[in-house]
Amino acid sequence: MACIGYARVSTLDQNSDLQHTALKAAGCKKIFTDHGVSGTRASRPELDKMLDHLRDGDEVIVWKLDRLGRNTRNLLALIDDLEGRGVHFRALTEGITTTGSMGRAMLTVMSAFAQLERDQLAERTRAGMAAAAAHGRRAGRREVTAEDRKVRRACELKAQGLKPADIGKIIGASRATVYRYLAMDTG
């Protein structure tokens, strides 16, 4: 029997060190980690590799239940697949394991509550966006036009002979953004 760890972070700038430390302390010799991958996706590169690696009698360990999946249906299907292959599952933070019937029941209940929480958050977000739209506000970044202060300043600096990289340092924008600003110049 091997203890196999799985870690996941949703964005590339997040760090999986906390998960790795906990998984190693739980006895995991091999840890598969997905970086910048949403837990709502059923197929993830490292998760797929881990599933191919697993053998009868192994145990999959995650730091938190939501690291394995954020969609109740997919999570429970994945756990069913593991159990059908003779692989056990354990979530460290929640103290859930599939080795007993009570752990299986708790897993189902907790994943359902996690799904409910995500659904409510999405619903509140949509309601907030609708309320903002009713007051004439739009979600997202505001549109940049040729009349904006930074665009005018970039054009002035370009006329003085500065290079886009230097202009970007002065106005606090990337070189690519400076090129977009300069392309807006109608004068």
Image: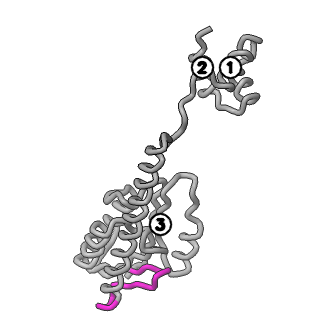
Is 106 drawn above or below residue 181 in the view shown? Answer: below
Q: Residue furthest left?
A: 84
Q: As rendered, which of 116 and 164 lies closer to the eye?
A: 116
Q: As rendered, which of 175 and 155 lies closer to the eye?
A: 155
Relative to residue 174, is residue 101 drawn left or right? Answer: left
The region drawn magenta spans 90-102
The image shows residue 55 at horizontal and vertical percentages of: 31, 74
* x 74%, y 17%: residue: 157
Residue pointed to by mark 2:
146
Q: As rendered, which of 61 and 2 lies closer to the eye?
A: 61
**Quarter assignment of residue 69:** bottom left
How much space separates mark 1 and mark 2, taking CA atoms?
7 Å
Residue pointed to by mark 1:
152
* x 53%, y 31%: residue: 143
What kind of residue is marked 2? Ala
Residue pointed to by mark 3:
7
Identify the mark at residue 54; answer none if there is no mark. Answer: none
